[in-house]
Amino acid sequence: MNDFMLKTQVQVAQRFLEDAIIQFEGYLNGITIKTLLMEKRGDRAYYEGLLSNLRRLLVYCEEGMDACQRIIQNEPFERNHAERILYKIYHKCIVEYYSPRYKLWFEDGRITYPEGSTIRFRQEPPDCFAGLLRNVEGEFHTLREALFEFESEFRTKRLL
């Protein structure tokens, strides 16, 4: 991948992360455990874990977006730094979305994205939480596909 393509990939990742952050922050700023329990009676500890995982994912997305902004603004373009940032975004944001800490939700590999949401929950979450993940899933899927090939090439390059 040449420098122009790599910089473009960083810009795409930055825009994606900005959108995800807006959605996650909006949700987290307006939700409480009480409102989740009022929407759907369930396991309080499970709901707390869902919000904890979402806050963690939000922090990773913010870190990734900040790193993208710095790389885009730096002149001359730092190829090695950009590659490391995209690698970290793949592993911290994308992988964390599909397989978060505590495994409160997971990706069901038997379902393809166009057929519907590939995210499955260990317990039934409130609709507002499931809806949030459904709203961002397409964008996460698109970025994962874009970064998957890059991630494989980067890992191979590091091994050589």
Image: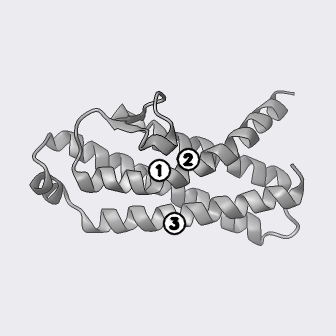
Task: Residue at 15% x, 60% y: name it.
Answer: 35
User: Which numbered tag is attached to residue 137?
Assistant: 1
How much space separates mark 1 and mark 2, taking CA atoms?
A: 6 Å
How much space separates mark 3 and mark 1, taking CA atoms?
A: 12 Å
Task: Residue at 79% x, 36% y: name it.
Answer: 153
Residue 116 horizontal side relative to residue 152, left or right: left
Task: Count neighbours of disc 2 (C-alpha within 10 A) and say few if under 14, some if 14 to 19, many if 20 or more.
Answer: some
Q: Amino acid at mark 2?
A: His
**Count of marks overlaid on the render:** 3
Task: Count neighbours of disc 1 (C-alpha within 10 A) and say few if under 14, some if 14 to 19, many if 20 or more.
Answer: many
Query: Toward which corner of the image does residue 124 lie, by quadrant?
Result: top left
Q: Amino acid at mark 1?
A: Glu
Q: Is 94 rendered above or below residue 128?
A: above
| CB within 8 Å, label 1 to label 2 | yes
- Residue 23 percent across, percent down from the top left: 42, 65
User: Which numbered tag is attached to residue 19?
Assistant: 3
Q: Is 157 rendered above or below residue 89?
A: above
Query: Toward which corner of the image does residue 82 lie, by quadrant?
Result: bottom right
| CB within 8 Å, label 3 to label 2 | no
Q: Is residue 55 visible?
A: no
Q: Earlier in the sequence, mark 3 or mark 1?
A: 3
Task: Residue at 86% x, 48% y: name it.
Answer: 1
**Residue tagged by mark 2?**
141
Task: Count neighbours of disc 3 (C-alpha within 10 A) and say few if under 14, some if 14 to 19, many if 20 or more.
Answer: some
Q: Quadrant of the C terminus?
A: top right
Task: Residue at 39% x, 65% y: name it.
Answer: 25
Q: Amino acid at mark 3?
A: Asp
